[in-house]
Image (tube, helix red, strand yellow):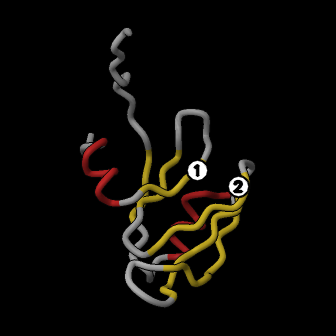
Amino acid sequence: MARYRKKPVEVDAVHFDGTNRDEVADFMGQTGKVEETKVPGPGRGLHDGIVIHTLEGDMTASVGDWIIRGVRGEYYPCKPSVFAATYEEA
């Protein structure tokens, strides 16, 4: 078995705080649309969130998630704990 290390890469990201849907939409530009929705958890019931329509399909982001533009221009949501463990401000 071989071991691998993640290459250092810088990404652009915006933190979705529940009030900045327009900022997320501006960040994504023409590449994707953003719509308000309700998403499950944490806990019971549905909570505020957004659906991100991208070329890779629809993805949901909850309040607190980061929206990342990847190295190929793709967009995807990332949970805060994963973002903190993976990225630091450049």
For disc 1, the marked residue is 75
Which three-letter amino acid code belongs to the residue tagged 1? Tyr
Front one among 9 and 65: 65
Q: Compared with residue 46, is residue 77 higher up or lower down, i.e. above or below?
A: above
Q: Compared with residue 60, is residue 6 higher up or lower down, i.e. above or below?
A: above
Q: Are marks 1 and 2 in contact (CB under 8 Å)?
A: yes
For disc 2, the marked residue is 54
Front one among 45 and 85: 45
Which three-letter amino acid code belongs to the residue tagged 2? Thr
Looking at this rendering, what residue extends furthest in the front direction?
Answer: 1
Residue at 43% over, 70% down? 16
Front one among 15 and 81: 81
Q: Is residue 54 left or right of residue 39?
A: right
Q: Secondary structure at mark 1?
A: strand
Residue at 39% over, 75% down? 17
Residue at 47% over, 73% down? 62
